[in-house]
Image (cartoon, rainbow, N blue to C red):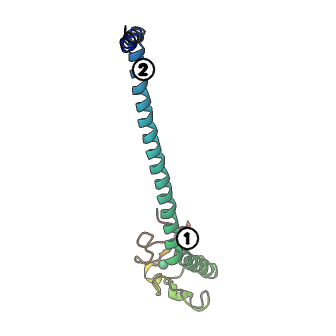
């Protein structure tokens, strides 16, 4: 027998024994699992990437909102409304609990000047002021859409609730 023949026979025999033991099949199964696993890992990595991207996007949106709130003077407008509210209360204390009929009545004793919404650069409050007696209540708000990051006619102030924010 030539060497080549011997090798061929031993190869055939060992291959047959291998497949009898189920080696080929289980090997294929393992191969499949490996590629499935690799596929899942790829998907996981893609999801993690997406997640990181979304987190970043969310953070930058929050920054944008915070920046918008600063740049459109929403906080300053709320301070104006608080000052108007306090002036109305002082007026009421001096007038048997009755609120002024208009904000102009606050000048100059309770407010030197009626404030201006710093975003609108105008008095956006006088036109919105409403009051009633028995029960004595009033509401006042920044009329219009002067604050880009907030709803129209906000912020608001009422004698019952103080500052009211948009949703
Ligand atoms: Zn305003």
Residue displayed at 55% across by 70% down: 159
Residue displayed at 51% across by 77% down: 71
Regarding residue 124, the answer to whether it shows in the image is yes
2 vs 1, front mark: 2
Q: Is 29 above or below relative to 79?
A: above
Neighbor class of circle 1 (other Cα within 10 Å; few <14, some 14-19, many 20+) is some
Q: CA distance from mark 2 to mark 1?
A: 79 Å
* SS under mark 1: loop
Q: Nearer the viewer, residue 143 or 7?
A: 7
Q: Is residue 85 left or right of residue 42?
A: right
* SS under mark 2: helix
Q: Position of residue 68 (x, y in %)?
A: 49, 72
Q: Position of residue 148 (x, y in %)?
A: 43, 74
Q: Is 32 above or below relative to 56?
A: above
Does the beta carbon at disc 1 come under 8 Å from ligand 1? Answer: no
Q: Position of residue 92 (x, y in %)?
A: 60, 79
Q: Nearer the viewer, residue 44 or 125?
A: 44
Q: Which residue is mark 1?
A: 159
First in sequence, mark 2 or 1: give its number.
2
Residue displayed at 52% across by 72% down: 67
Neighbor class of circle 2 (other Cα within 10 Å; few <14, some 14-19, many 20+) is few
Q: Which residue is mark 2?
A: 27
Q: Position of residue 55 (x, y in %)?
A: 50, 55
């Amino acid at each position: 027998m030539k060497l080549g023949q011997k090798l061929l026979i031993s190869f055939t025999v060992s291959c047959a024994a291998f497949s009898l033991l189920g080696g080929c099949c289980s090997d294929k199964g393992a191969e499949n699992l490996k590629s499935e696993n690799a596929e899942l890992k790829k998907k996981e990595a893609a999801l993690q990437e997406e997640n990181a991207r979304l987190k970043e996007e969310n953070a930058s949106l929050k920054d944008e909102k915070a920046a918008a709130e600063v740049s459109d003077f929403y906080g300053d407008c709320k301070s104006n409304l608080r000052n108007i509210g306090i002036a109305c209360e002082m007026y009421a204390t001096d007038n048997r609990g009755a609120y002024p009929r208009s904000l102009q009545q606050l000048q100059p004793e309770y407010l030197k000047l009626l404030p201006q919404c710093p975003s609108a650069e105008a008095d956006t409050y006088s036109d919105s002021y409403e009051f009633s007696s028995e029960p004595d209540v009033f509401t006042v708000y920044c009329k219009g859409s002067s604050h880009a990051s907030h709803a129209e006619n906000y912020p608001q102030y009422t004698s019952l609730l103080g500052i009211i924010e948009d949703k």
